[in-house]
Image: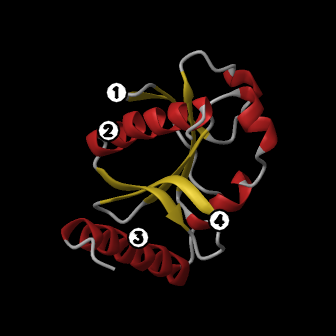
Amino acid sequence: MATARDDTAQKLARGVGRLLRDLGYDSLAEFTLRSGRRADLAGIDRKGRIAIIEIKSSTADFRADQKWPEYRDYCDLFYFAVPMDFPVEILPEDAGLILADAYSGDIARPAPANPKPLHASRRREVTLRFARTAAKRLRRLEDPRP
């Protein structure tokens, strides 16, 4: 059974996904990195820039989950996405901030460029993983047979 947190996170993911599309990014929800960590949303734009968005549905969600700093090793831009009524002052200021709902989102604070730029081999690995994940998901939609 889905929890209220899951429902809120899913709605935020949809709204942020729409924002990413409007900004020229193609995105995937629940994108697993080589480290085994799963980013809530990851996007790649036409220039190959990689953005990772960590969705926080509540203060408790933010305080309970401290794995997000590891995501910075896999992206050019890192954002938190939160509901409009979230107390944003508790979020780190060295990350971008997206205020979102189920329908869209707005960048309240641009993400600073990653101080440790992605190495070419890491960028290639993330890009290939992104492409393969997208292809596998599409294949499952086209042919759900195991």
Mark yes or no: residue 109 visible.
no
Whether residue 7 sits left or right of residue 134 in the image: it is: right
Nearer the N terminus, badge 3 or badge 2?
Answer: 2
Q: What is the spatial separation of the Cα atoms under label 2 and label 1, in whole angstroms?
A: 7 Å
Which residue corresponds to the image point at 70% horizontal and 35% vertical from the top-left? 93
Residue 130: which numbered mark, if any?
A: 3
Which disc number belongs to residue 18?
2
Q: Secondary structure at mark 3?
A: helix
Q: Position of residue 24 (x, y in %)?
A: 28, 48
Q: Is residue 126 left or right of residue 6?
A: left
Q: Are marks 3 and 2 in contact (CB under 8 Å)?
A: no
For disc 4, the marked residue is 37
Secondary structure beneath label 4: loop
Q: Are marks 2 and 1 in contact (CB under 8 Å)?
A: yes
118, 2: nearer the viewer: 2
Residue type at numbered disc 1: Tyr
Mark 3 vs 1: CB contact within 8 A: no
Q: Which residue is mark 1?
A: 103
